[in-house]
Amino acid sequence: MSAPHQQEPTDFTFDADSEAQIAKIVARYPEGKQASAVIPLLYVAQKQMGRLTGSAWVPRVAMDAVAVKLSMAPIRVYEVATFYFMFNTKPMGRFHLQVCGTTPCWLRGSDDVLRACKDAGHLKGYGDTSEDGLFTLSEVECLGACVNAPILQVDDDYYEDLDYDRTVKLIESLKRGERPAPGSSIGRQTSAPEGGPNTLLDIPMMAKE
């Protein structure tokens, strides 16, 4: 199900914030190699859609705008946008809930995280968007934070060390318009053991030059 009231737009123009980002991005590449900026520009377009409409996705007209910016054939932009999972090519909910179900997260309880997302977000399963347009649920492969499994990625933020209750609490906060600080939900220090570090407890400060 698509987010309510989201239709394929008929036009797309980069706003001032996006234009400023694009100028910085394109300047990183040598003359004649601007096409190398296609991935970051697609991301700029997706972020603008999220900022302006509440649904972070890349409609075809936004892909066309990227093609014009980079003097590329539109089909080349379509190929990139449809290849990478990071780009949403259909309307999304306000919050994109991405559950990692790869082995370390699964062993640590990702099934409970999924169940919490479905219960608290009123979602039927992967690929569904809630009736209120708040949440879209996706399954993703390894997010690279296995030591703090299980992980739920919300948009660009990682929420770690989750269980059913902590996931429900997170989703209820999002419903209220609150954005909890990302990271460990149990106060873990980076990737240290639960309860705190037990090695390298006395690391001397580096002398200032």
Image (cartoon, grey):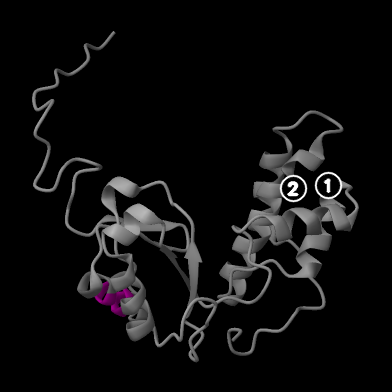
Instruction: Report the amino acid beneath label 2.
Output: Val
Identify the residue under disc 1: 70
Q: Is residue 8 magenta?
A: no
Viewer-proximal residue, 186 or 31? 186
Q: Are discs 2 and 1 less than 8 Å apart at CB? A: yes
- Label located before the other in sequence (2 or 1): 2
| Residue extending furthest toward the top | 209
Q: Is residue 125 left or right of residue 71?
A: left
Q: What residue lies at 8% left-to-right and 34% top-to-bottom? A: 198
Q: Quick check: 8 above or below 31?
A: below
Identify the residue under disc 2: 38
Main SS class of the magenta portion in the image: helix
Q: Horizontal and vertical percent for residue 191?
A: 24, 42
Please tell me whether mark 1 sits on a helix, a strand or a loop. helix
- Circle 1 residues within 10 Å: few <14, some 14–19, many ≥20: many
Hey, which quadrant is residue 37 in on the image? top right
Hey, which quadrant is residue 3 in on the image? bottom right
Q: Horizontal and vertical percent for residue 98?
A: 45, 66
Viewer-proximal residue, 127 or 170? 127
Distance from the alpha carbon under mark 2 to that under mark 1: 7 Å
Which region is colored magenta?
168-173
Where, quadrant-wise, is the C terminus in this rendering? Answer: top left
Q: What residue lies at 8% left-to-right and 47% top-to-bottom? A: 195
Q: Quick check: 73 above or below 92?
A: above
Viewer-proximal residue, 68 or 197? 197
Which label was assigned to residue 189? Answer: none
Q: Quick check: 41 above or below 51?
A: above
